Image (cartoon, rainbow, N blue to C red):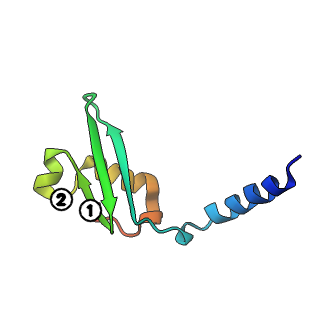
Amino acid sequence: MDYGMIGKIEKSKFYAQEPERFSFDSFNVRLEGDSGGLHHIKYESGQWDCDCSFFHTRGYCSHTMAIERVLGEMLGTPAAA
């Protein structure tokens, strides 16, 4: 048995219980929409970007809001509810 790995798994559980430890600088996500279309969403320095037309007219969309819901408090206060 790998006792070193057991310690790492326990530490990861501890970290996961404290989402305030995490901060996101940037990431990219692909989200499959209802109509089968694939949307590309980017988060960088606290700002969202999505390739859908709704986002480009409003600054938020169902795709970015869905990711905010999935990640919850780890991202901080959502731009739009």
Q: Residue furthest top?
A: 36
Q: Is residue 2 above or below residue 22?
A: above
Q: Is residue 17 left or right of residue 42?
A: right
Contact check, label 1 and label 2, Cβ < 8 Å = yes
**Rendering coords of residue 65 (x, y %):** 31, 53
Mark 1 element type: loop
26 and 64: which one is in front?
A: 26
**Picture disc at residue 37:** none
Residue that appears at 45% across and 59% down: 72
Few, some or many residues within 10 Å of mark 2 (<14, 14–19, 20+): some
Mark 2 element type: loop
Q: Tell me which amino acid carries mark 2.
A: Gly
Q: Tell me which amino acid carries mark 1.
A: Ala
| Quadrant (top left/top right/bottom left/bottom right) for the C terminus | bottom left
Q: Is residue 60 above or below residue 79?
A: above
81 and 28: which one is in front?
A: 28
Q: Which residue is mark 1?
A: 80
CA–CA distance between discs 1 and 2? 9 Å
**Rendering coords of residue 8 (x, y %):** 74, 58
Residue that appears at 37% across and 47% down: 29
Few, some or many residues within 10 Å of mark 1 (<14, 14–19, 20+): few
Q: Which residue is mark 2?
A: 59
Residue that appears at 62% across and 61% down: 16
